[in-house]
Amino acid sequence: MSAPDCPTDTLHALALLQSTSLSPHERAMMGTLLARLGDPRFRADAWGLPAEPLLGFTRIPAGPFLMGSDLTRDADAFSDEQPQHAVDLQYDYYMARYPVTVAQFQAFAQASGYQPWDNDSLQGLPNHPVAWVNWHDALAYCEWLTARLREWAETPEPLAHLLRDVGWCVTLPSEAEWEKAARGADGRRYPWGDDPDPNCANCDATGIGKTSAVGCFPAGVSPYGVEEMSGNVWEWTRSLWGSEWNKLIFPYPYKPDDGREQLQAPDDIRRVVRGGAAWGDRQYARCAARFLVDARDVFNVVGFRVVVRPCL
């Protein structure tokens, strides 16, 4: 359904969801209403991907950015975020504007016959971020979407060329790719700046207490136009943490070629998640905050977003 064909009440609800004059609770209510009316921001004929020229993918330019935290300047930082250091990503890549939604994950499971680890991942409001997915569920979705976009006649450029001819793929972002998309190049603490703001992200201070429709926090957009990178759900990355909760195998400085991006790592090596969640405090909502989850585990606070990038 394109915007001009939408009923008036749907367009009104969409305008209110994106209005910075409403409170987070009111915008979240509009998101729930849109889920029931039919959210025009997403294409039913494109597996629930955003109805945008690049299907919701936004370009993140190559170049350096500041990764991690300086503990002398950020009292909320954790020790595993240090030292703060420059990382130079040598390629452009395309990050999804939103985390994968329930509707997108449902479309994948229905089309492919995939059985997720927990059927609760197939439940919930369609425009909310999917949860209850483990790392393998997320990668299965990525592999399926790679194949669909390579073969689909309507895949837009430059994504079509990159996926078909250059050998790029849809996959989980690395920690570095995730963090740069969230904070830009200037080392800001949150996607919107240096100060916590419950109007910019669905976290515990916002008081919603559950997931919200993606796009409810327009003031929290990152410098590159990526949304929902703070709060709502934790997001899987491809990066490895280690087998022990209290010991990093791959500490900072970040080195992409030291083994931390091995997709074939055994399940006893925990993976890094990013972004915080609706129940998390401001410390975990920061761009540099990291946490770890067993690759086989599912939680109501863990989802994922995808990136189009060179395949490893």
Image (spheres, rainbow, N blue to C red):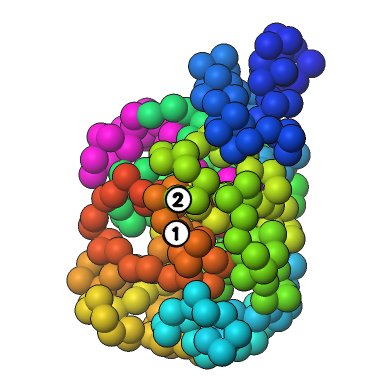
Mark identifier at residue 281:
1
Judged left or right of residue 102, residue 42 is right
Point out the tag, 2 or 1, that comes first from the N-terminus.
2
Q: Which residue is mark 2?
A: 204
Q: Secondary structure at mark 2?
A: helix
Q: Does residue 149 sit above or below 106 in this rendering?
A: below
Counting from the top left corner in percent of width and height, residue 168 is at 59, 60
Judged left or right of residue 222, residue 287 is left
Which residue is farthest right? 4
Q: Residue at x 70, y 65 (%)?
A: 193
How far apart are the alpha carbons under marks 2 and 1? 5 Å
Residue span colored magenta: 97-123
Whether residue 106 can be seen here: yes
Q: Residue at x 59, y 38 (%)?
A: 24
Q: Toward which corner of the image does residue 178 lie, by quadrant?
A: bottom right
Total numbered labels: 2
Judge by depth and name the residue closer to the eye, 63 or 216: 216
Judge by depth and name the residue closer to the eye, 151 or 96: 96
- Residue 110 falls inside the magenta stretch: yes
Judge by depth and name the residue closer to the eye, 125 or 149: 125
Q: What amino acid type should be assigned to the residue bearing mark 2?
A: Asp
Counting from the top left corner in percent of width and height, residue 297 is at 24, 55
Q: What amino acid type should be assigned to the residue bearing mark 1?
A: Asp
Is the residue marked by circle 1 packed among few (<14), some (14-19), or many (20+) residues within 10 Å? some
- Residue 108 falls inside the magenta stretch: yes
